Image: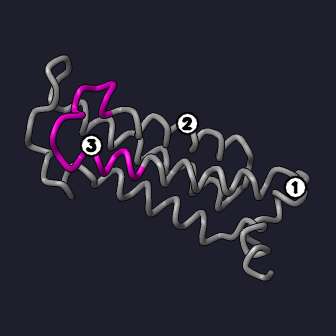
Amino acid sequence: MSDIRFFETHHTWEDWLGMLLGLLIVLSPWITGESNHGFGQLYEPGFAILNAVLVGILVFGLAQMEYIALQRWEEAAEMALGLWLAVSPYVLGYSGEGALRVLHTGLGGLVILLAALKLWQDWGLTDQDLARHGQ
């Protein structure tokens, strides 16, 4: 019973996990070793790297904003960024072989799940409850 209640409250470790995911997204082209390879036939090779860096910085920034001043729109924006990251290998043309496609799809899914959990936890809170987050 206490395990269920644990997931009913938005904890600050969830925001830290969001920041960690943002950092992993930024570093993902270098983690996989695919930062020096060309991707796709429609786009420049740097699009996958630029996409990873921009999405990672935005996810990191939103998680940091949640840690400081919690708002529901931040979680919705994280969900949108996670969805974009998960589908970007197919949209930007680097969905062929390679670990970057798998990593971006997986990290995007984790961002979506974490943002959905936090949004579910915060859905019924008042503005005063959201303002007390992290205190």
Which amino acid type is shown beneath numbered disc 1?
A: Leu
Which amino acid type is shown beneath numbered disc 3?
A: Arg
In the picture shown, does residue 24 fall above or below 16?
above
Q: In the image, what residue occupies the spot 82% across and 58% down?
A: 131
Percent across and percent down for residue 95 are 24, 34
Residue for badge 3: 101
In the picture shown, does residue 81 fall above or below 9?
above
Q: In the image, what residue occupies the spot 76% across and 73% down?
A: 4
Which residues fall within the magenta stretch? Answer: 89-107
Which quadrant would residue 49 be assigned to in this image?
top left
Which quadrant would residue 21 be assigned to in this image?
bottom left
Earlier residue among tags 2 and 1 = 2
Q: Please identify, in this view, whether the residue under mark 3 or under mark 1 is nearer the observer.
A: 3
Percent across and percent down for residue 28 are 27, 52
Of residue 10 and residue 61, the one placed in the foreground of this image is 10
Q: In the image, what residue occupies the spot 16% across and 45% down?
A: 98
Spatial distance from mark 2 to mark 3, Cα to Cα? Answer: 18 Å
Q: Quadrant of the C terminus?
A: bottom right
In the picture shown, does residue 36 fall above or below 16?
above
Of residue 14 and residue 102, the one placed in the foreground of this image is 102
Residue for badge 2: 80
Q: Quadrant of the N terminus?
A: bottom right
Spatial distance from mark 2 to mark 1, Cα to Cα? Answer: 22 Å
